[in-house]
Amino acid sequence: MYIININGIVQGVGFRPFVYKLAYNNNLKGYVRNSSQGVEIAVTGDEISLNNFLKQLKNNSPEASIIDTMIVTTLPDSNFDSFQILPSLIDSGITHISPDLALCPDCLAEMNSTTDPRHEYSFINCTNCGPRYSIIKSLPYDRPATSMGKFEMCDYCSGEYSDPLNRRFHAQPVACSECGPRLQLLDCHKNPVPGDPLSLTRKLLKQGNIIAIKGIGGFHLACLATDDDPVNTLRNRKQRPHKPFAVMGRKEDLDKIVAVKPEDIQLLQSPAAPILILPSTGKYISQLVAPANPSLGIFLPYAPLHHLLLQDDLRFLVMTSGNFHDHPIAACIDELPPICDYYLTHNREILNRCDDSVIRAAQPHNIMIRRSRGYIPTPLSSDQILSDSFAAGAAMKLTFALAARNSIFLSPYIANNDTLNSLDFYQETYNKFCHWFKIHPKFAACDLQPDFMSTRFAEKLDIPLYRIQHHHAHIVAVMAEHQLDEPVIGIAYDGTGLGDDGIIWGSEIMIADCLSYQNKFHLEPLPLPGGDAAIKKPIRIAYAWLRQNMLDTDLLNNISDFEKNIITRQLASNLNVFSTSSMGRLFDCVSAMLDLVTQISFDAQAAMALEFICPENIMDYPPYEYYFDQQNIKIKPLLKNISHDLHQNIPHHIISARFHRTIIEFTLQAVILLRKESSINNVVLAGGVMQNRIIFSNLISLLKRNNFTVFTPRLFPPNDSSIALGQIIIANNLDK
Ligand code: ZN
Ligand code: ZN
Ligand code: FE
């Protein structure tokens, strides 16, 4: 007899019915049951069948399952009459919760079949697909503990639910149009609109209306992506002039709007169904969807409702998170900004919000931008045994982390900024995660920045608190992913993070391990007059930096004499002037010098504009000048060269290429110096600037060509979403 213990994502993904069928087909006896560690199987039978069983168990497991470990123990045979699915084994270990899963091909086929009882049913699902995380109230994951608890199954559904050979066996959200959730269409005053909600919604979308559509992790604001008018209206009402929107389209239509490779399709079709940012073809879609942007974020229909909406001539929809600016995504109508013409809603409650995940296609591998629906709350396993602990994160792209034993749970993306509304969502998710995963934090970690909402939250927990430097956390987050604990050369190129000397850092090249860091090189600190005011108006940074370096400011457009006066006075008096070594600000400065973006309406807009005009082959362009003055990378020659090129009317794309090349050149020089000094050959890339495809791929290949071993963020974003991950590892090492 074999006892097989399987760990990983094996609950709520059709694993037990799969095992049952496999045992049944191989004529084996025994049982399968959920345990708090995963799944436990006992099987007896002849040797050939047992070996077959083991092989198929490994190779044919359900698509949404992830087997982390599988331990097979041989024991003397027991007597079993049959193969059974036994009730769950309750013990005190950590249970994992499956992320939400996109509609599977079997359910899609049923939904499209006119003879199926669930024909065109918007909530069809099975053990391989459907909502999970977003509908869970408590554990163990059983129907009454989900927002499906209030729907009593009809005979047809409960027949499938209790048949071990059916793919809906113990599919907790199982439902049909007789017994399950229903759609409802409301007008802008939230009064019901009579008629078929689906066909009405499709008609109204085609007429150019903005419709809030309740999905899996929250509401989307939807409108036709092919026409300027609705997109323009949505931009005006959402007060979001430039930030790109994502577009949902059918698989067969994708190549019309983006350059898509087979591996991209595979990712888009995966159970996580993320948004993938790909090169745009510039056709079909309104230019207002992603203004002045050569790429487009696209995703496939992932909820049954999406498939039903995107039919016939309704091909491409803008589907953007339904929220107020910088607030968390709305889970109910009352949380939505009052800017919709209609609401397509339903009576299955979203208990746990999560935004769509976003990935950027890049070389040599994709870059995770936002890790949320489809990925959370799958934990990262660590080699290290961790204490029950909490890490609060930063402020931008806010997430937190909780750890226990060898698992680290990252929260869903809370919001882009720490507004008061995000505090409620943060607190609520914190309580749930502690409860579900049975974590009682003994200590906490937070950023050095005292003003962050996350810092204040951690302070109030009244447990020992470790304040962790932002860029050290960035680097250790990547180390955690790769299970590194020996010292590395870490590069954290970023927007903003408080340094241990009171300066705003953001271009740190460190020697770091999971406990401490030595800051070795960074851009020379330059003034940021007015702080946030300058971040919002990069032209002010350009003016200040050119002045500070005694360079000509005449070439700058879009800055008034009034502003120049203020900045000059600020610089002279040093009042309300911050000092920063931020790489993000250097991008802002150059972008403004080139007159690409002089005032931003969303984070990283100026830096992105500079990247967008950059040709791929930057190694064909010579770098600008720079020099090292002890720890400082001096950029006066760089600014001087760019000013010179602007006066010479050198095309902007060439200036951008040379600028990008300069950054990777001085980075290489710095890490070569550090390798000489320390004999460390492992280099870690981190920070928001690593979302820049040009920097990311060229830096990786240049470092590899110089025989460095390069570690990059893969499963987690390089940006501030991963700060909590780094913080929790450092705090656990400090607490030892
Ligand atoms: Zn399914
Ligand atoms: Zn039913
Ligand atoms: Fe950061």
Image: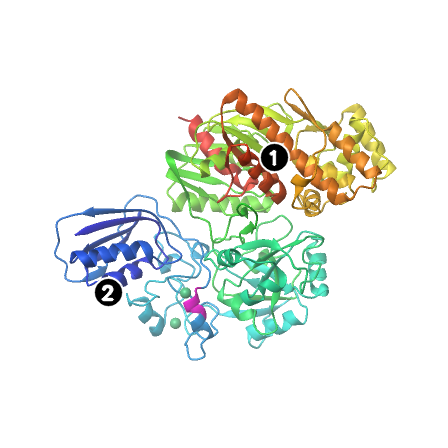
Question: Within 8 Å of ligand 3, the CB of disc 1?
Answer: no
Judging depth in this view, the residue of 84 and 710 nearest the camera is: 710
What residue is shown at x 47% (from left), y 40% (from top)? 401
Is 131 included in the stretch rendered in magenta? no
Determine if residue 533 is in view: no
Q: Position of residue 650 (x, y in %)?
A: 80, 41
Side (left or right) of 268 relative to 141:
right
Side (left or right) of 315 relative to 86:
right
Judging depth in this view, the residue of 306 and 365 nearest the camera is: 365
Taking the image as four quarters, which one is ligand 2 found in? bottom left
- Callout 2: helix, strand or loop? helix
Where is 721 relative to 349, above or below? above
Q: Position of residue 648 (x, y in %)?
A: 84, 38
Q: Which residue is mark 2?
A: 25
Q: Position of residue 147 (x, y in %)?
A: 43, 60
The disc placed on residue 576 is: none
**Amino acid at the residue labelled 2:** Asn
The stretch in magenta equals 104-108
The residue carrying pointer 1 sits among few (fewer than 14), some (14 to 19) or many (20 or more) residues within 10 Å by Cα, namely many
